[in-house]
Image: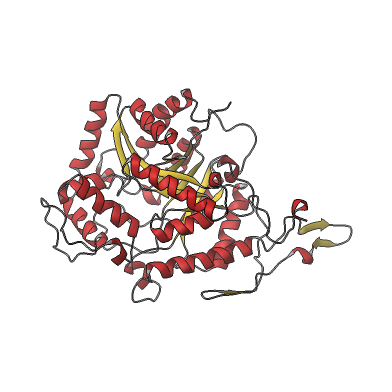
Amino acid sequence: MTRRQLHLNAFLMNTGHHEASWRLPESDPYAHVDLAHYVRLAHIAERGTFDSLFLADGPQLWNSVQQRPAGALEPITLLTALATATEHIGLIATASTSYNSPYNLARKFATLDHLSGGRAGWNIVTTAGAEAARNFGLDAEPAHAERYARAAEFLDVALKLWDSWEDDAIVADKAAGVWGDDAKIHPPRHQGRYFSVEGALNVPRTPQGYPLLVQAGSSEDGKRFAARYAEAVFTAQQTIEDARAFYTDLKARTVAAGRDADHIKVLPGIVPVIGSTEAEALANERLLEDHIVHAHGVDRLERLLQLAPGSLELDGPLPADLPPESAIEGAKSRYTLVVELARRDRLTVRQLIGRLGGGRGHLTFAGTPEQVADTIELWFESGAADGFNIMPAVLPSGLEAFVDHVVPVLRARGLLRTEYGSARRTLRERYGLPRPANQHVITPALV
């Protein structure tokens, strides 16, 4: 019997996920706008037989550019370039349902799926924050529930657009002079609360049918949305107990929504700091923490916790009277995770900033390759994860260390493929997911 295998995604963020990574001598402060940097990272991840790579994004520039390399290349454009430089790895881009239109975004992802041979994925976000809202003519961000209601209609329209061409709509009959079959084109003619979309997509149905649908919110609204639509979920969990509870809850919600529990993959984030010995790994971690500028961390925490500037004392605890999650309209689940981490481990603001510096609330782990592999295996085998979102603290060296030293351990344990194989496979196939049927086609089994 073949052992169940991990799904690994490489979460790529400029010079690394640690906020001080750009200050190390090895780092290039301009790497975040360098195509060659991303091509190199994609090649490393492909050498490690990762299922996919992922780019985060947001339609705003944060208040200060002092902390770390700021701004980012538009991810769908960047992934289109990476599609020509890679052969197997999936390409997942973040795009907001709050500040896009379904037609344009559906067209972009369909294009990426065609050009990559079926390797496109969409990380669906609803985009919190007043900064983004003001870039699109709004005085404040829409309410949390409102953003998810819009996202649900956005997805429904996108699915109609991707299904607006049947797979065999192209006839290509040169002798008869007939290129396509109009009877197999299905305009959405959608009239809804948020969107009005009349015509069919101007891109044929793609190799995957539509891109792998990924979601990253862990609030109640986020989990309901994921259970209905998501095929992979990126989540932040600090403990294995919390990860198991999230995993069990989300799988149950997915079944209740009428879907197969195995058709949604849960991938917690992990920030591995690797050393040949445990002492070396801890020294690498301390080096990064020593480069943190705490004033930046205080500012970031005050914005996350919706506190007035100057509210936090660096060597004191978080205030006792923080608002409940229900009062937060921004990143609800991340707010709760950070507050619970500080309360549970009795951290000062300075200590909390150190803990968040590597992964912004994702699990950070410093150890040997074997210890990192042990943690991954434990979570994977005990019902806490279907795989992991690998978030190297420093790039490219952290990804190279993971691929060169942790991946061989996982392969030796039978947890990870040793090669992609000769056949080209879609991203959906990598994640063990079926190609979706077109909603306009009745299959013989249903007749």
Query: Residue 340: where, in percent of width, then height?
Result: 25, 51
Residue extending farthest to the right is 175
Q: How is the image coloured?
A: secondary structure
Residue at 37% across, 38% down = 396
Residue at 30% across, 61% down = 325
Q: Quadrant of residue 99?
A: bottom left
Query: Residue 408: where, in percent of width, then height?
Result: 44, 25
Query: Residue 374: where, in percent of width, then height?
Result: 37, 29
Q: Is residue 121 above or below residue 367?
A: below
Q: Quadrant of the N terminus?
A: top right
Q: Is residue 32 visible?
A: yes
Q: Is residue 27 above or below residue 258?
A: above
Query: Residue 377: where, in percent of width, then height?
Result: 41, 31
Residue at 23% across, 40% down = 288
Q: Is residue 37 toward the left or the right of residue 3 in the image?
A: left
Residue at 53% across, 54% down = 256
Closer to us: 113 or 356 = 356
Q: Is residue 30 toward the left or the right of residue 77 in the image?
A: left
Q: Is residue 74 visible?
A: no
Closer to us: 257 or 279 = 257
Closer to us: 25 or 263 = 263
